[in-house]
Image (tube, rainbow, N blue to C red):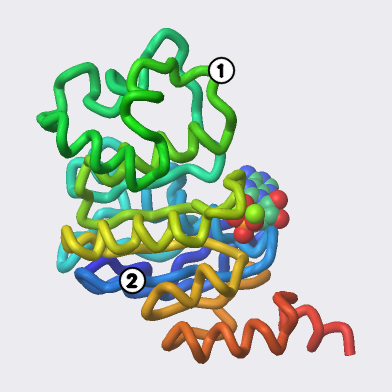
Amino acid sequence: MLLLRNITYSANGRKILEKINMRFKEGMSYSILGPNGAGKSTIAYILMGVIKPSEGRIFMGDKDITELNITERARLGISLLWQEPARYDGITVEEYLTLGGKLNVDKEELKEVLEIVGLPYELYHSRFVDKSLSGGERKRVELASILLLKPKYAILDEPDSGLDITVTELIDRILDYLKRIGTTIILITHHEDIAKKTEFSYFVCSGKIVRKGFSDEVVEYYKRACGKCPLLEVMRY
Ligand code: ADP
Ligand code: MG
Ligand code: MG
């Protein structure tokens, strides 16, 4: 189980997250739903160890992992799909996905995973992961890399952004695959249709959790709020 306990994060004198408590149980799927600027990516960075919380602790099971860096957390099985995919000049898709041959993947598995993300092996394996790939294609390559890593916890920061309209089926295939291999899914999105694909949701806005529970119920609440932050509405009236 991955646990955020009373996480507060401040930067430049501003509270970006305030007393966030979240619990991600083994093999379950979760979404973190909220409008732009809610603090979703910041939660992803806190989980991955990109940034350290100002207050609060992070646990994996009984182990306090708050002080562990990105590499150490990756070793424990946490992986992050960044909202903005990176570029790697001079590295092919196949080299990137097999970590230059260091990751033990057979060709059938590589083909299957590339098929899932919608990049046929024959067309893409020797392409370079640089600016010759579109942002959407690079995002698909990153998704493939997460599937091949078989992480215990996959944090997917807006896997639907930068992709085209076939995206809901793509997300279905990715979630199915991760479920099948027992990965805990933490899906960040501002789309209710995507959040509905997970079992549980946290609705976050203005750095706070405003609703949590079964995704259907949280999504209904999110819809009634028109995807806006009810905390801000309360403050205004
Ligand atoms: P989301 O991913 O939900 O769109 P973010 O987590 O990226 O939101 O950001 C939440 C808020 O915190 C935004 O208003 C953003 O501008 C602000 N923010 C994030 N990092 C910093 C920082 N280092 N300094 C100041 N503001 C920041
Ligand atoms: Mg955003
Ligand atoms: Mg974000």
Quick check: marks 2 and 1 in contact, CB under 8 Å?
Answer: no
Q: CA distance from mark 2 to mark 1?
A: 34 Å
Quadrant holding the N terminus: bottom left
- Nearest to N terminus: mark 2 or mark 1: 2
The residue depicted at 41 percent of the width and 42 percent of the height is: 118
> Which marked residue is nearer to the observer: mark 2 or mark 1?
1
Secondary structure under the numbered disc 1 in the rendered image = loop
Residue 67 position (above or below residue 180):
above
Element type at marker 2? strand
Quadrant where the C terminus sits is bottom right
Q: Is residue 51 visible?
A: yes
Direction from residue 158 to residue 15 in the image, left or right: right
Q: Give residue 38's mark.
A: none
Q: In the picture shown, does residue 143 fall above or below 193?
A: above
Type of the residue with mark 1 = Ser
In depth, the one of 225 and 118 nearer the eye is 118
Residue shown at the point (28%, 28%) measured from the top left: 97
Amino acid on which the number 2 mark rests in the picture: Ser
61 left or right, relative to 145: left
Q: Residue at x 46, y 78 (%)?
A: 201
- Tell me, for residue 132, which label it has, or none: 1
Report the number of numbered marks.
Answer: 2
In the image, residue 173 lies at what x, y percent? Answer: 35, 58
The picture quadrant where one finds residue 59 is bottom left
Residue of label 2: 29
Q: Is residue 5 visible?
A: no
- Could you classify mark 2 by the number of other residues whose Cα lies within 10 Å: few (under 14), some (14-19), or many (20 or more)? many
Which residue is found at the position 15% from the left and 35% from the top? 108
